[in-house]
């Protein structure tokens, strides 16, 4: 599975969860108990798991995601290969070990939300 951030292919992709979420909704019930929903927009939330990364790969990833919005190309089960603008909601880097002056990071989880 190939995922790209601004045409940079993410290294060591383990998995990607594509979740369609509803934003800015208002749910009410009528007198008979029927649900009434005022839905404004559906958006995609991506959760990407990456395997261990070297410091240079991590720095490249941080540089790309430093922008508020960036382009992400991923496999959408609904429409196939899709490119949309996302922002990074959560990005955690945990050091695994340092060997010969090179820092290696543990598997990491990236949470992105569509613009």
Image: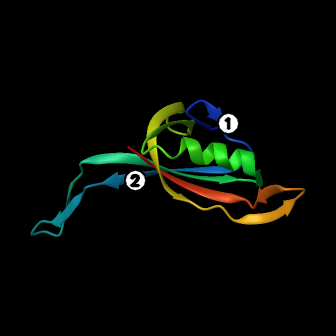
Q: Using residue 24 as the reference point, say whether residue 107 is left or right of it.
A: right
Give the residue drawn at x 62%, y 45%: 61
Crowding at mark 1 (Cα within 10 Å: few <14, some 14-19, many 20+) = some
Please indicate whether residue 50 sits to the left or right of residue 38 in the image.
Answer: right
For mark 2, give the secondary structure. Answer: strand
Give the residue pinned by disc 1: 2
Q: Quick one: 20 or 9, which is closer to the camera?
A: 9
67 on left or right of 63? left
* Residue 10 sits above or below residue 81 on the image: below
> What quarter of the picture does the C terminus occupy?
top left
Q: Can residue 35 be seen from the camera position used here? A: no
Residue 77 picture location, percent across and down: 55, 40
Sequence-earlier tag: 1 or 2: 1
- Determine whether the residue tagged by mark 1 lies in a helix, strand or loop: loop
Residue 6, position in %: x, y? 55, 33
Residue 106, compared with residue 68, is above or below; it is below
x and y, in percent, of residue 4 in the image: 61, 35
Residue at the limit of the structure toward the front, as seen here: 101
How packed mark 2 is, by other alpha carbons closer than 10 Å (few <14, some 14-19, many 20 or more), is: few
Q: Mark 2 = which residue?
A: 21
Q: Position of residue 62 (x, y in %)?
A: 59, 48
Q: Residue 40 vs residue 16: left or right?
A: left
Instruction: Please identify the quadrant where the N terminus is shown.
Output: top right
> Residue 91 is drawn in which quadrant?
bottom right
Is residue 58 among the parts visible in the rendering?
Answer: yes
| Labels 1, 2: front one | 1
At a point 38% along the width and 46% down the height, the residue shown is: 43
Vertical order, 24 against 71 (above or below): below
Separation of marks 1 and 2 at Cα, in angstroms: 23 Å
């Amino acid at each position: 599975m190939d995922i790209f951030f601004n045409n940079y292919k993410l290294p060591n992709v383990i998995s990607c969860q594509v979740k369609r979420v509803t934003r800015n909704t208002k749910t009410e019930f009528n007198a008979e108990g029927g649900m009434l929903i005022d839905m404004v927009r559906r958006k995609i939330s991506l959760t990407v798991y990456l395997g261990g990364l070297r410091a240079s790969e991590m720095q490249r990833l941080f540089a790309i995601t430093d922008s508020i919005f960036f382009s992400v190309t991923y496999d959408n089960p609904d429409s196939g290969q899709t490119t949309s603008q996302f922002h990074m909601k959560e990005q955690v880097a945990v050091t695994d070990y340092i060997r010969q002056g090179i820092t290696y990071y543990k598997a990491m989880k990236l949470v992105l939300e569509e613009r």
